[in-house]
RNA sequence: CGGGGUGUAGCUCAGUAUGGUUAGAGUAUCUGGUUUGGGACCAGAGGGCCGAAGGUUCGAGUCCUUUCACCCCGACCA
């Protein structure tokens, strides 16, 4: 993309109500803008990031033999009445009426719809297991939406549902999804923890949450510094009385308290703040039994499906990446999530030598499949640097006055270090950095 | 859902206690000039139904009523 043609309305000032870094920088960087309470528009940069995350999620799920579908966003109220969740979810479900006065719900989640989809279409144990997912808009009418993309009312979520002929097979899939989720978050370049969790309104037995570690997270986790153990503190309160005394304390107080308890591996336990970006549940027959979704087993017996469900907050991940990766100047995208990985900054576009080198590099990198931005805007050097830092390109090639000596600079956003490189070898250098 | 707050230029905000010329600033935008390695400088220009609807008044951004929207604290919540 060329900066001179791009719709990237960056701003010096953040909206006064934004408190989180991700909210401030995503708005200032021209990624998103607010449409209403808990409602956000994605502008070109935000849309690219969202699609990149979505593509990685899809690729890993497809590798694990999950299949993507797309369920209707507007669903008849009857679907929710049959499962009893019309009542249970209450006002969080946004209800609307059509011209015939029929009542509908904007899907907050899709267990019912997915069970209905599979019911009577898969009727034999021979056709199991089956794992279907979608990456689609959800709407939850939160009492108080806040924190930008972190807790919106309308959001993009991947929700997956698996169907099995036995509990053992369901647990196998549950474990497979845990591994798949780890691959996804690792590929995204995130520092995360898998923790034992409370299963909340969805219900079911085994449940694990995936948290991106960030100071601004809304959840408090207890994590072991030595092994992989981690738990959401909500769960611990319920199961371990001795830590219950800490319940009333604030997070800051918690930080100062030493937990005498050691992890079973012997490592020390620490409190961390986390952003929940994934949640997997073992459902069993919680939905299949009441909705009468049955199959025949090898003995010809009719049984409800054993089910599990798997969620990833795709639009929340956009914010989570920034909560974990930013500094006072703006966003620091990971290589996998950056809207453009390389920014070629032509310091003075009136300088034909600078401009033609910029164009040449732009073409070469694009031909190599690199997502690259050519900053051919008329702005001055300082403005362009501030802009690049705010947007957060992982690398910026600075083509400026040093070109007279045949040199350009490679600026790394995360470290803010600048490396002087011969203009002739900068392409190879970038390819090396990106490999 | 309880409690509190805010709506004035694209954005960030003054102005409202005590009603009174033509509603301001910064920033952004446009023109021209000077600049050209860290959001530059000078000069000029455009941009407003003061959230909306009623009311009081000779006169309302300012006072009253209603309403809508957004935000903050809490409760709730994948």
Image (cartoon, rainbow, N blue to C red):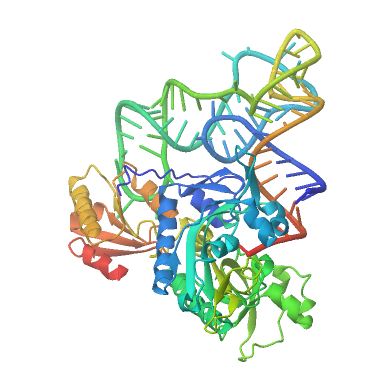
Q: In percent of the image, x 59 and y 63: which residue is there?
A: A111
Q: In percent of the image, x 23 and y 42: which residue is there?
A: A350
Say if A254 sits above or below A315 in the image: below
Q: Nearer the viewer, residue A15 or A292?
A: A292
Q: Residue furthest front?
A: A300
- In the rendering, at what x and y percent does residue A185 appear? 47, 70
Whether residue A306 is visible here, answered yes or no, is: yes
Q: Quadrant of residue A306?
A: bottom right
Q: Quadrant of residue A54?
A: bottom left
- In the rendering, at what x and y percent does residue A170 appear? 55, 79
Say if A76 sits above or below A163 in the image: above
Q: In percent of the image, x 48 and y 55: which residue is there?
A: A329
Residue A267 placement, left or right of A186: right
Residue A327 placement, left or right of A426: right
- In the rendering, at what x and y percent does residue A52 appear? 40, 60
Say if A186 sits above or below A262 in the image: above
Whether residue A223 is visible here, answered yes or no, is: no
Q: Nearer the viewer, residue A75 or A270?
A: A75
Q: Nearer the viewer, residue A417 or A175?
A: A175
Residue A348 placement, left or right of A223: left
- Which part of the image, by quadrant, shows the C terminus of chain A? bottom left
Q: Nearer the viewer, residue A185 or A81?
A: A81
């Amino acid at each position: 993309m060329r900066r001179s043609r791009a719709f990237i309305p960056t701003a010096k000032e953040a909206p006064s109500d934004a408190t989180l870094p991700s909210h401030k920088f995503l708005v200032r960087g021209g990624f998103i803008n607010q449409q209403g309470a808990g409602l956000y528009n994605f502008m070109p940069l935000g849309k690219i990031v969202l699609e990149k995350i979505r593509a990685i999620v899809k690729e890993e799920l497809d590798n694990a033999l999950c299949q993507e579908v797309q369920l209707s966003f507007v669903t008849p109220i009857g679907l929710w009445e049959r499962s009893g969740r019309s009542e249970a979810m209450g006002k969080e479900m946004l209800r609307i009426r059509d011209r015939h006065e029929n009542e509908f719900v904007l899907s907050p989640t899709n267990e019912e719809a997915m069970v209905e989809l599979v019911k009577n279409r898969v009727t034999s144990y021979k056709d199991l297991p089956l794992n279907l997912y979608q990456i689609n808009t959800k709407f939850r009418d939160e009492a108080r939406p806040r924190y930008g993309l972190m807790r919106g009312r309308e959001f993009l979520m991947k929700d997956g549902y698996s169907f099995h002929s036995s509990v053992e097979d369901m647990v196998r899939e549950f474990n497979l999804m845990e591994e798949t989720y780890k691959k996804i978050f690792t590929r995204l370049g995130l520092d995360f923890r898998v923790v034992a969790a409370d299963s909340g309104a969805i219900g079911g037995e085994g449940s694990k949450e995936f948290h991106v570690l960030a100071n601004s997270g809304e959840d408090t986790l207890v994590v072991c510094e030595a092994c992989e153990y981690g738990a959401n503190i909500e769960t611990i309160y319920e199961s371990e009385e001795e830590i219950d005394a800490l319940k009333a304390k604030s997070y800051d107080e918690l930080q100062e308290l030493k937990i005498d308890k050691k992890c079973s591996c012997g490592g020390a336990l620490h409190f961390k703040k986390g952003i929940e970006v994934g949640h997997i549940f073992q459902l069993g027959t919680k939905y299949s039994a009441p909705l009468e979704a049955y199959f025949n087993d090898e003995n010809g017996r009719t049984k409800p499906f054993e089910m599990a469900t798997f969620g990833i907050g795709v639009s929340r991940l956009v914010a989570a990446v920034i909560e974990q990766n930013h500094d006072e100047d703006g966003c620091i995208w990971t290589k996998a999530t950056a809207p453009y990985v390389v920014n070629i900054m032509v310091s003075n576009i009136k300088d034909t030598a600078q401009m033609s080198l910029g164009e040449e590099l732009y073409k070469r990198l694009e031909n190599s499949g690199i997502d690259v931005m050519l900053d051919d805007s008329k702005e001055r050097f300082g403005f362009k640097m501030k802009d690049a830092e705010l947007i957060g390109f992982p690398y910026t090639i600075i083509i400026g006055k040093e070109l007279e000596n045949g040199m350009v600079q490679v600026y790394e956003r995360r470290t803010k270090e600048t490396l002087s490189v011969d203009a002739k070898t900068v392409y190879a250098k970038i390819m090396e950095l990106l490999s």
